[in-house]
């Protein structure tokens, strides 16, 4: 018996070339599943590494995999439902494959779409603070739009009571363009205001907790003289696909990389760039509102505005 390097490759079911699945928790137990041995998260290549004792004939181990939104053997994020046995050889060349490498497929979540063209199907997963699925989480949706007649049918007011399933998953159809107030269990003191996008599907979590996602500057570059002032109009879009009003100054901060070359002032509908000294610099943007933390945080998608002052 000797220690061997064991690699678990986790991929999706895409055909013909599966993609790796990152951040899957892989836990290793003895064959009976009653003794925990080790754990690791898959990297960007979908690989989790372990050092385990092997033999010939092989030692058996049980592995359990979990990631919210990924199903292993029919479960979504619950590793207690996904045990699989692996055989670890020493030397590794004694195994049928010549290695102690194992590939496991996971079924990734495909966001469902509404069948009614007037509706958007919002869906998403919720977790507890320990990372486990938040089953039986209550969400109450209250329409805030005016009474409407849609395709001859009356759209009545009234609360819509919903609850997540055992996987912490919830989906609901909402009228496109409709505004709803949502009371989320444990967040009763701060109801969420939702504006439904004109799409067939959307991430419910991003509707409830939107952040600034993209900023586009018009024009995309400036060439100006010292003392000149030029207008720039930003288009700020949230992760809920809503275009925010004006410069969205409460949500984003605009900053000149070299404030000796140019300055920026923020007005309601536009930015004003003033040339101060000859040189080149750029206008950048970052989130001001940090009340919602996103992991991983990729920042705002944008191309900085290039500024040349002569």
Image: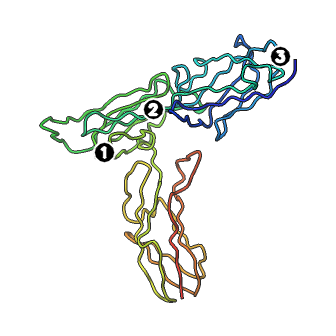
192 versus 243 height, above or below: above
Label 3 packing within 10 angstroms: few (<14), some (14-19), many (20+): some
Which numbered disc flags the more N-terminal residue, 1 or 2?
A: 1
The residue wearing badge 2 is 185
**Residue at 54% in and 80% down:** 262
Which numbered disc flags the more N-terminal residue, 1 or 3?
A: 3
Comparing labels 1 and 3, the label whose residue is closer to the camera: 3
Q: Label 2: state its secondary structure.
A: loop
**Spatial distance from mark 1 to mark 2, Cα to Cα?**
19 Å
Of the pair 19 and 182, the residue shown nearer to us:
19
The residue wearing badge 1 is 179
Comparing labels 1 and 2, the label whose residue is closer to the camera: 1
**Residue at 82% in and 14% down:** 56
Quadrant (top left/top right/bottom left/bottom right) for the C terminus: bottom right
Quadrant (top left/top right/bottom left/bottom right) for the N terminus: top right
Using the rendered view, name the quadrant where residue 276 is placed. bottom right
**Residue at 45% in and 48% down:** 210
The residue wearing badge 3 is 55
Q: Label 3: state its secondary structure.
A: loop
Q: State the colouring used for the structure image.
A: rainbow
Of the pair 17 and 264, the residue shown nearer to us:
17
The answer to whether 47 appears left or right of 121 in the picture is right
**Spatial distance from mark 1 to mark 3, Cα to Cα?**
62 Å
Residue 251, label in figure = none
Of the pair 148 and 105, the residue shown nearer to us:
105
Of the pair 306 and 299, the residue shown nearer to us:
306
Q: Position of residue 297 (x, y in %)?
A: 58, 50
Label 1 packing within 10 angstroms: few (<14), some (14-19), many (20+): some
């Amino acid at each position: 018996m000797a220690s061997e390097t064991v690699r678990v490759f986790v991929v999706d079911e895409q055909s013909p070339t599966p993609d790796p699945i990152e951040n899957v928790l892989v836990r290793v137990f003895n064959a009976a599943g009653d003794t925990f041995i080790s754990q690791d998260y898959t990297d960007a290549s979908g690989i989790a590494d372990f050092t385990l004792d092997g033999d010939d004939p092989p030692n058996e181990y049980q592995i359990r995999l979990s990631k919210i939104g990924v199903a292993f053997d029919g479960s979504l994020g619950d590793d207690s439902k996904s045990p699989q046995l692996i055989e670890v050889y020493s030397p590794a060349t004694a195994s049928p494959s010549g290695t102690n490498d194992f590939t496991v497929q996971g079924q990734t979540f495909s966001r469902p779409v509404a069948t009614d063209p007037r509706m958007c199907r919002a869906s998403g997963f919720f977790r507890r603070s320990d990372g486990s699925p938040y089953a039986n989480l209550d969400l109450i949706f209250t329409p805030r739009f005016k009474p409407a007649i849609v395709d001859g049918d009356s759209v009545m007011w009234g609360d819509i009571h919903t609850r997540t399933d055992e996987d912490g998953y919830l989906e609901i159809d909402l009228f496109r363009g409709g505004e709803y107030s949502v009371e989320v269990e444990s967040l009763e003191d701060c109801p969420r205001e939702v504006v439904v996008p004109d799409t067939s599907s959307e991430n419910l979590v991003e509707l409830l907790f939107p952040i600034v996602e993209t900023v586009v500057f018009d024009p995309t570059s400036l060439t100006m003289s010292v003392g000149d002032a030029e207008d720039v109009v930003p288009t700020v879009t949230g992760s809920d696909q809503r275009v925010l009003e004006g410069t969205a100054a409460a949500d984003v901060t605009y900053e000149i990389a070299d404030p000796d070359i140019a300055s920026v002032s923020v007005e309601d509908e536009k930015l004003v760039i003033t040339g101060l000294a000859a040189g080149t610099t750029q206008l950048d943007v970052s989130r001001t509102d940090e009340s919602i933390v996103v992991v991983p945080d990729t920042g705002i998608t944008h191309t900085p505005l290039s500024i040349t002052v002569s």
